[in-house]
Image: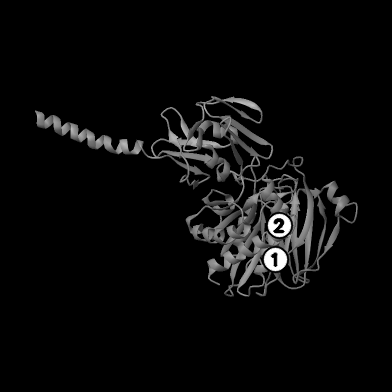
Amino acid sequence: MKKWSAAVVFFLFLCLFPLMAHADRTPSIVLDGVTIDQKTGAPAENTGKTVMVPIRIVSENLGYDVKWEQATQTVHVQRGNSSIEMTAGKDAATINGNVVNLDAPPLIKQGTTLVPLRFVGEGMGLRVGWDNSTKTVSLFSIPPVVDTEPDSDPVVTPAPVGQTELQSISYSGDRLIIATNGNISPKVSSISGPERIIVDLPNTTFSQTFVQGQASSPDGSGQLVVTDSSLVSKVRFAMFSQSPSTVRIVLDLTQSATANWSLGENNVLLVDLSAANGTSGSQPALPENDGKMVVVIDPGHGGRQSGAVSVTGAYEKDFNLAVGLKVKALLEQKANIQTVITRQDDTELSLQQRVDIAKLNQADLFVSIHGNKFTTPVPNGIETLFTRKESKNFAETLHKHVLPVTGLKDRGVKVASLHVTRETTMPAVLLELGFLSNPTDEALMFTASYQDQCAQAIVDGILDYLSL
């Protein structure tokens, strides 16, 4: 009987020992996916009722200034207009002058001030979490990256039933872009003698804004003179029929060409042209397999989709385009790379149209360029996002080249379910090149030197990945 009792005790000891060892583990702190080094001072600890974290380590990793006042045992945390004050042993603190009750008073250990985890979240606008099984404190200064880009395009108020209004027509890079404010069912065809591409838009009329700004006559008719295309000499438009109301756009060709079109959920129609004899225009819709690697550069947002608005009122779409055009110019100097850019101006494209452009061009790589944002000025730095496992190596390679030249915080390479990185079929990456909501990041992002550095680093990353 005694042997049996001893065996039971021994068995229970073996079962409990791992739990006891686990309970003694020093909690780790993970900020935005990166584990914080706690080698100096007292680390985080779980007192049983409250998880306590070192305020200086967390604050400084978020860019706050931390000062310790020995006489009053008070910690002052400051960044811009945000301020936090707390005193050892007192169960209340102040945030921007407002008194906040604490779950437990701050502790002083090894010269380190430990404060309740929940207070860190309230005081710094962080999302906090505690995993008791792994003894891990999780801090997030930004929402999950899956929210970085909406999975659907903005809803556009439709025109009256049965009548869609054409709002703009443009032609650039051998791409016709037509924006409307309602549903359209385009009919695209080609005619010889002379060579033309015809785009008909049934149940569509010209908007008053278009007539006043772009048309050359009161009925909406007019033309665009094209000077940068080897395929198209001019683009003409007019009302083709009154019943039903139909707008016709005619592309007068200088040589035989084929057209591929894509209609986005935002009612923007893209018509990409390529030479029918196999010689390429400035941006073919279906490039010939000539051994070149096709790289698509995608400046995010555009048109009515401004993206984030910076702390000084600048638009993300302008930053994205500036960097994208610089990347395009650098890549075009490489003889073994064919570069395609989704937009060269303030064009509005849907997310699916960006994917369609990559697929139409049989792209080998896809790079979407963005600026980040948050509701507070605290988060900053660079992060690189991808969705499919085939894109991981490309994402890591780009991040490796881009991060050092920026001098900004490393927010890591992360998995995110974004439309342009999920629905594409080639390695696809979305780069967040700084926070427009952070004054320090934003001040850099709209300088030519920063944009040049980012563009060169992106090109270097592409060449490294392709082993060119």
Depth check: 265 or 38 in front?
Answer: 38
Query: Which mark is first along the chain, 2 or 1?
Result: 1
Q: Give the residue drawn at x 90%, y 55%.
A: 217
Vertical order, 296 against 159 (above or below): below
Which image quadrant: the N terminus? Answer: top left
Marks 1 and 2, how far apart in space? 22 Å
Q: Residue tagged by mark 1?
A: 273
Q: Residue furthest left?
A: 1
Q: Which mark is residue 321?
A: 2
Is residue 231 visible to the viewer in this orientation of the structure? yes
Is residue 348 visible to the viewer in this orientation of the structure? no
Residue 237 location (% of width, % of height): 82, 58
Task: Tell me the kind of residue under disc 2.
Answer: Leu
Vertical order, 418 against 140 (above or below): below
Q: Residue furthest front?
A: 71
Q: Give the residue drawn at x 60%, y 50%.
A: 381
SS for dot 1: strand
Contact check, label 1 and label 2, Cβ < 8 Å: no
Q: Give the residue drawn at x 67%, y 65%.
A: 328
Task: Tell me the kind of residue under disc 1.
Answer: Leu
Depth check: 191 or 199 in front?
Answer: 199
Vertical order, 180 against 136 (above or below): below
Q: Nearer the viewer, mark 1 or mark 2?
A: 2
Residue 14 location (% of width, % of height): 23, 37
Depth check: 457 or 183 in front?
Answer: 457
Depth check: 281 or 374 in front?
Answer: 374
